[in-house]
Amino acid sequence: CIKVVLSVIMFFVGRKIIQWILNVMRRSLERANVDAGVIQFASSAGKAVLYVLLIINIAVSLGVKESSVTAGVTVGLALQGGLANLAGGVLLLLFKPFVVGDYIIQDQSNGCEGTVAKIEICYTTLLSIDNKKIVVPNGTLSNSTIINVTAKENRKLEIKVGISYEADIQKAKTILEKILKDDPDTKSDSREMVVFVDEFADSAVIMGLRVWVSTERYWPTKWRLNQKIKEEFDANGIVIPYNQMEVYVHQQK
């Protein structure tokens, strides 16, 4: 009974010491301007190692052989995929396909996407657009195709819209060019903007435009341009065709 009581006390005291060590380590890394993902990974790894050492010491004080405890921890990690996730976390930090704050897409079957919130020893946490918390094993991420949406400062925006075959193509191009030049977020001064005829579809001539925009303004710019294109085409009598179905009803006499 005395050993059990001492072990409980040792655990709570050890937990306080571990928290103090982690706080000191985190502050030291922050003062050294280390990347946020590295700080999170180091804190998570340090926490895991220190708790394992604490548990081993408590188990040994209760009479369990040290070799048995170590073997049990190793087998447990292997069975849970912990070693693969640990290796995956190290690879993510070494090659840096993304950092904390990036928006990534896991491009595979049943993949996920979101803003990177934390990179820890075995798992990476993403926050989706609707603020759902997504926890992905590092082993899975390191073996997946990752699309980093926010890695670059600028993104190329492409919009395609169909116009009637009776519409004036040159007039439509002029309207689209003016919309691009007048928009406050398009990079007309530094990157080439293009307006083109993309294809002759079954019921419409497909017009397209491409322009560089700031990554952080990509979606607001796309939504605003879509609305502006519809408004300007309507004002200038350019029809945007849509699929229609004609139904004929025949009554038998």
Image: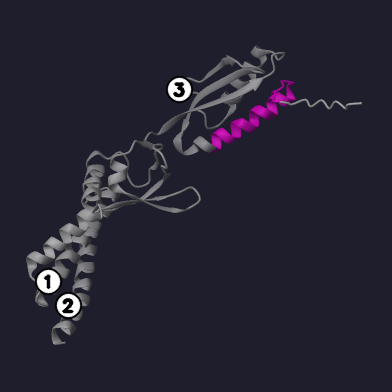
**Inter-mark Cα distance, 1 to 2:** 9 Å
| Residues rendered magenta in the picture | 220-243
Taking the magenta stretch, the answer to whether it contains residue 141 is no
Observer-side mark, 1 or 2, equals: 1
Residue 5 % position (x, y): 18, 84
Mark 1 secondary-structure assignment: helix
Instruction: Give the percent coordinates (x, y) of residue 68.
Output: 10, 66
- SS type, badge 2: helix
Please tell me the numbered disc located at residue 182.
Answer: none
Q: Is residue 42 visible?
A: no
Give the vertical position of 140 relative to 5 (above or below): above
In the rendered view of the protein, which quadrant contains the N terminus? Answer: bottom left
Instruction: Give the image quarter of residue 151.
Output: top left
Task: Please name the amino acid that badge 3 sits on.
Answer: Arg
Q: Is residue 228 visible?
A: yes
**Mark 2 residue crowding within 10 angstroms, few (<14) / some (14–19) / many (20+):** some
Q: Earlier in the sequence, mark 3 or mark 1?
A: 1
Q: Quadrant of the C terminus?
A: top right
Foreground tag (2 vs 3)? 2
Chief SS of the magenta region? helix
Residue marked by disc 1: 57
Horizontal relation, residue 102 to residue 89: left or right: right
> Based on the displayed image, in which of its 4 quarters is residue 180 positioned?
top right
Q: Is residue 79 above or below residue 219?
A: below
Q: Are marks 1 and 2 in contact (CB under 8 Å)?
A: yes
Residue on which the image places disc 2: 10
**Alpha-carbon neighbours of circle 1 within 10 Å: few (<14), some, or many (≥20)?**
some
